[in-house]
Amino acid sequence: MPLSRTDIATPKAQSYLQQLCKHFGHKIPVDFTPEAGSISFPFGTCRMTADATTLTITVEAGADDLERMEGVIQSHLERFAFREELVFDWQRETA
């Protein structure tokens, strides 16, 4: 399955990881700690790791849904991080 990954520089990486997981956890399966999380969408999976300065996000979905996955995660993060401008540089890979 195709993968897409981005590394986002932010001092709030752990906070955003937890916020995303808690938000989606009301609707779909999630699993998270302060340093790592996964969200299982019906059309793909999002895995995240966070440290003091970087939130790393990897999404995996079918070729037709990969861009959708990127958009869902990015739009939610941009809403949560409205006080800072996050930079997303999605890099595609083939698993």
Image (tube, helix red, strand yellow):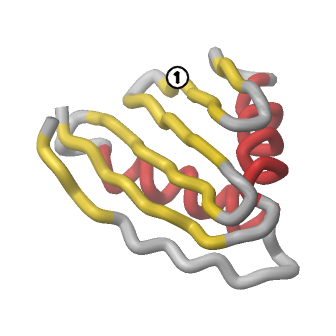
Q: Which residue is mark 1?
A: 40
Q: Image height check: is 85 above or below 16?
A: below
Question: Is 66 on the left or on the right of 92, as rendered?
Answer: right
Question: Is 94 on the left or on the right of 42, as rendered?
Answer: left
Q: Which secondary structure lies at badge 1? A: strand
Residue extending farthest left: 94
Amino acid type, callout 1: Ser
- Image quarter where the C terminus lies is top left
> How many marks on residues?
1
Q: Position of residue 89 (x, y in %)?
A: 40, 73
Residue at screen point 73% across, 34% down: 21
Residue at screen point 50% across, 27% down: 41
Residue at screen point 81% across, 32% down: 22
Q: Image height check: is 79 above or below 49?
A: below
Q: Position of residue 17 (x, y in %)?
A: 72, 45
Question: Is 42 on the left or on the right of 8, as rendered?
Answer: left
Q: Position of residue 7 (x, y in %)?
A: 49, 63
Q: Image height check: is 85 above or below 63?
A: below
Q: Nearer the viewer, residue 70 or 56?
A: 56
| Image quarter of residue 60 | top left
Within 10 angstroms of label 1, few (less than 14), some, or many (20 or more) residues? some
Question: Is 94 on the left or on the right of 50, as rendered?
Answer: left
Residue at screen point 64% across, 33% down: 36
